[in-house]
Image (cartoon, grey):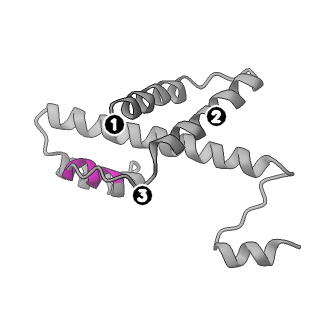
Amino acid sequence: RARPVFEKMGKNITLVGPNGVGQTTKVANQIVVALTIEAVGEALVFASKAGADPAKVRQALMGGLAASRILEVHGERMIKRTFAPGFRIELHQKDLNLALEGAKALGVSLPNTSTTQQLFNSCAANG
């Protein structure tokens, strides 16, 4: 019954399961987003410190399997050092807390999510 409403709100509508699974899917998405932002940052720092032009490295990566919207948008912001917020870090922290709390309840370890959460906490503490 709700499908016509969802079709007005977006193009890709996927029924992922019963009530509650949509929230799980959203949290899973945020894990991918947060860890990918962190990975792009690390990759560009690595390339830069190794003497490579990070803009050229990003361009090369965009032509391969590492290509992503995050590499495209956030990678460019990182290279240009434009750090105007597009999504409040507090919301990333909330989402990763939900992921880590859910994982703990399920007995699942998410070590990279935990490490990324620590980095986001540090960023928030340092403005």
Q: Residues within 10 Å of mark 3 (few under 14, many from 20)?
A: few
Name the one closer to the observer, 34 or 71.
Answer: 34
**In the rendered structure, which amino acid carries the disc numbered 3?**
Arg
Q: Residues within 10 Å of mark 1 (few under 14, many from 20)?
A: few
Q: Mark 3 sits on what residue?
A: 69
Q: Earlier in the sequence, mark 2 or mark 3?
A: 3
Residue lying furthest left: 51
**In the rendered structure, which amino acid carries the disc numbered 2?**
Ala
> Do residues under tags 1 and 3 come within 8 Å of each other at their CB atoms?
no
Segment colored magenta:
74-80
Name the one closer to the observer, 54 or 1.
Answer: 1
User: In the displayed structure, does residue 81 sit left or right of residue 16?
Assistant: left
User: Which of the 4 quarters of the picture holds residue 31?
Assistant: top right
Residue 127 placed where, x, y %?
33, 36
Q: Mark 1 sits on what residue?
A: 127
Q: Mark 2 sits on what residue?
A: 99
- Measure how far apart labels 2 and 1 are at the Cα level: 23 Å
Name the disc covering residue 19, or none.
Answer: none
- Measure how far apart labels 2 and 3 are at the Cα level: 22 Å
Q: Can you tell which of label 2 and label 1 is closer to the viewer?
A: 1
The residue sitting at 10% across, 35% down in the picture is 51
Name the one closer to the observer, 45 or 114.
Answer: 114
Q: Can you tell which of label 2 and label 3 is closer to the viewer?
A: 2
Secondary structure of residue under mark 1: loop
